[in-house]
Amino acid sequence: MLEKLDLSKTADDDGYEKTLEAYSDRLGVLQRTLREQKIPAMIIIEGWNASGITMAVHEIVHALDPRGYALYAIEKPTDEERARPFLWRFWLRTPPKGRISLFARSWYSRAISEEMQKHTWEKSLKVRVSQINNFERQLSDDGTIILKFFLHITKEEQKARLEERERNPLTAWLVTPSIWNIHRHYDDSFPVIDGFIEKTHTDYAPWTLVEATDRKYAILKVYAAIIRTLEKRCETAGDGKPKKQKDKEIVKPKKNPVRRHSRPDKIFTREELQETLSQLQVEMLEMHYHLFKRKIPLIVVYEGWDAAGKGGNITRVTRFMNPLGYYVVPVAAPAGHENDYHYLRRFIKYFPTRGDIAIFDRSWYGRVLVERVEKFCPESDWQRAYQEINEIEEEFVSSSGGGIVKFWLEISKDEQLKRFQQRASDPVKVYKITDEDWRNREKWDQYAEAIDEMLARTSTEIAPWTIVESDDKWFARVKAIRTIIAAARALL
Amino acid sequence: MLEKLDLSKTADDDGYEKTLEAYSDRLGVLQRTLREQKIPAMIIIEGWNASGITMAVHEIVHALDPRGYALYAIEKPTDEERARPFLWRFWLRTPPKGRISLFARSWYSRAISEEMQKHTWEKSLKVRVSQINNFERQLSDDGTIILKFFLHITKEEQKARLEERERNPLTAWLVTPSIWNIHRHYDDSFPVIDGFIEKTHTDYAPWTLVEATDRKYAILKVYAAIIRTLEKRCETAGDGKPKKQKDKEIVKPKKNPVRRHSRPDKIFTREELQETLSQLQVEMLEMHYHLFKRKIPLIVVYEGWDAAGKGGNITRVTRFMNPLGYYVVPVAAPAGHENDYHYLRRFIKYFPTRGDIAIFDRSWYGRVLVERVEKFCPESDWQRAYQEINEIEEEFVSSSGGGIVKFWLEISKDEQLKRFQQRASDPVKVYKITDEDWRNREKWDQYAEAIDEMLARTSTEIAPWTIVESDDKWFARVKAIRTIIAAARALL
């Protein structure tokens, strides 16, 4: 076990440099332990302008092996980032197992500086609080250590430091009029920041407030808190997850589950359906132009039984759509490095930018379908996923003003058998059928149970499921494209 | 073997739709063959505004399995992309093995529209021609198929099409004043584009000019050229590389190789060195500020024998540097998915943005060191690498206005043994020494040969090697930081 440092020492006891060196060595050792135990960690340094964020980051970085950390200085979002949900760029910067993501400023500074400009800032910030708490809880549940620091200085101290920077020719150009302007609003910002910190101070991602007037004291306090937290985790963990998880309120499936049907109530001829589809494809093209022009993003999720016709359906829906404004995301089993992150990250990465349509051919729902049935993850993971998914879809919609359409392509067990056999006997299609498909088919009932629970627990107001009766492929295509058009129209 | 299609058929012979369907099916089959044979392909569609680029892309995309292609609509670069070398964002979009990258416009449109605005556009375009030809040759040598199309319409036809778009309420907003302005300069642009195409029409990346007034004819011509090229390669290849490579002029090592020394001529005391280092660290901090303010990027490459002290040297060089303006890129063996790309891609990804310093702890030189000695790649690959590396460094410097500093940290064989033994007997440092280090040491002479050839063939005017005599670590640190400061000063 790790030998403990005396973290109560201060600069005065033993000399600042010596204490700092001891802390730094210890952090180096702890970083290697994190790596061995595959524990990811996020360290967030926030604070007033000129409070010493850079200096704190600097000292921490010097203790770390560059192979094991990434440092992100969070500034204004780029155009690409601005066109995505608020947390998108932070999701992409979450650490993989065994590594540290260090943030010099973060979603906190961004939320405050972006939302405060709005008239409805109080309401906006409330939304951000909820999104941020969800984000941090999801990562924590997945085993990520989250440490947050706020470096505090008084308005007078800030003024003195800004003036000091202005006197130094090397740093004077960094003290812009906008920095002074923020300084003048110190007293107005104080209660807002204070309230924000209070509302995001959680068990899973607590804040440490650091009195940062004495720079040396501040550095040692940050160091000590990091070391204390990492030591605690490294001692108790081993599987990359906190030992004791607080009991989660498990949402029960709805009483009135979504009914799956593989055949429509009314039967149409193939000619009728094809004729209707052609008209709808033209309408889809127009609707796509409107979304594109208005910069509204849309997510379309295709889930369904093997051989339910997802690929063919997508091809028909997109037939006349401008390929520069939509893309299909084919989802396979995660690649090696993708497994090192929270399972949602690889999907969030492909969330559409403003005006784009992202069509997911399978999706994050794999967590509560194949991963559940095949036991690729423990029950606690997929149980937690329903809520996580609902939260992430909610964040997409509320942050981007876009929409989510989710299809379950339902076929009967007999229809599936027929299609499997057709594929197996057709030399052009035989590549589409694998042993795995046959194995999955044997677990039909287990999948059915997982599907029903998924439909019940993730059919939300902002992202409802649509059952697409797919025994008749042409009917299914018409229903899918019609549903997308209606959803798009509702967004305009 | 693949059954051949009759590609000489035109729309008139057999009906457009039917021919298109046959071509589309064939392309689908070829895509699967590419995947099986692990061949990457790039298809670039260029042309005049309103020449039908989107329509061509649209038809190709519909033939493809979404799992195997990525479509990139190349527009103006984002701020982040603008702060990197010209080809940076295109490198990141090159296809991995077995996949297709499809470009709707590309580095060609960008080069012309960005360079034409400069006074010195003729000279700038000449530089771009050379960079683009190098880029395409490097990818082709690595096995990538490159197909380039230019869709041609006359000025009158363009006018008619733009007016047609303006009449359609769905597309009218896309016809901006700037599009009309470009149209008015059609006659001026013609010879420039023509010359650019001529100079980038190469064996390894040929252009196909497509008369695009008849849209159907254009689509079929593009399709036929793609199918013909892919069929040819799928028949001959198997290892993902073109069977017959043209003979390369192999650059001979320079007559006067760079001499490696592990000890400096003059001996200093440790106190002298530490005192000097402290002063230089402060100077480095200032220099870093100047680079940052002037937005000049710098690459620092550390190569050297195992235990030569790269890590400690980097720590000392960066001691007072602002961590928000530099980063260390620790280079290990490539991860699985990185092997699917040209070996340079994973390094180019970390090339610094304007004002940043990127410090590579090992680098792309691994290709001609460890990969050569350990035979991780065939001789033709590492032989080719000298030229590729020189080209890529040249492109970085000329595109970004930045600099490259390259260190070889030299220690004697005895000194290495001493350090290995120290590490092995120190419980804090023992993790730093592995069996691999001992194995590498046994191949000292083979490495020495590879190092000498590397120094001789890649010590260029814009990116020379500096030998850092590292038997004395403190001397090495002083020399490294002094060299970086001098290089930075030369850039200001």
Image (cartoon, coloured by chain):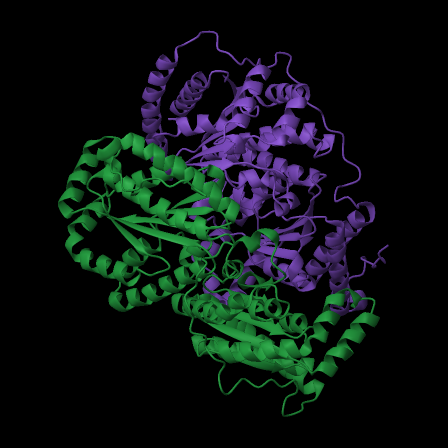
Chain colours: A purple, B green
Q: Is residue B142 above or below residue B475?
A: above
- Measuring from the top left, give residue A62's x and y in whole percent: 66, 64
- Measuring from the top left, give residue A333's x and y in whole percent: 61, 38
Q: Residue furthest top?
A: A266
- Measuring from the top left, give residue A77's x and y in whole percent: 47, 48
Q: Is A285 or A459 nearer to us in this picture?
A: A285
> Residue at the spot x=24%, y=35% of the render?
B11
Q: Is residue B322 above or below residue A385?
A: below
- Measuring from the top left, give residue A183's x and y in whole percent: 51, 53
Asked if one can make out residue B116 in the rendered structure from this viewpoint, the answer is: no
Count of marks, rendered view? 0
Q: Is residue B181 left or right of residue B246?
A: left
> Residue at the spot x=66%, y=37% of the render?
A137
Q: Is A136 or B16 nearer to us in this picture?
A: B16
Quadrant containing the C terminus of chain B in the rendered view: bottom left
Q: Is residue B469 left or right of residue B67?
A: right
Q: Residue furthest bottom?
A: B266
Q: Is residue A278 above or below residue B237?
A: above
Q: Is B79 or B372 nearer to us in this picture?
A: B372
Tell me where residue A325 sits by quadrant.
Answer: top left
Q: Is residue A111 left or right of residue A401?
A: right
> Residue at the spot x=62%, y=47% of the render?
A337
Tell me where residue A107 sits by quadrant.
Answer: top right
Tell me where residue B294 sits by quadrant.
Answer: bottom left
Asked if one can make out residue B306 in the rendered structure from this viewpoint, the answer is: yes
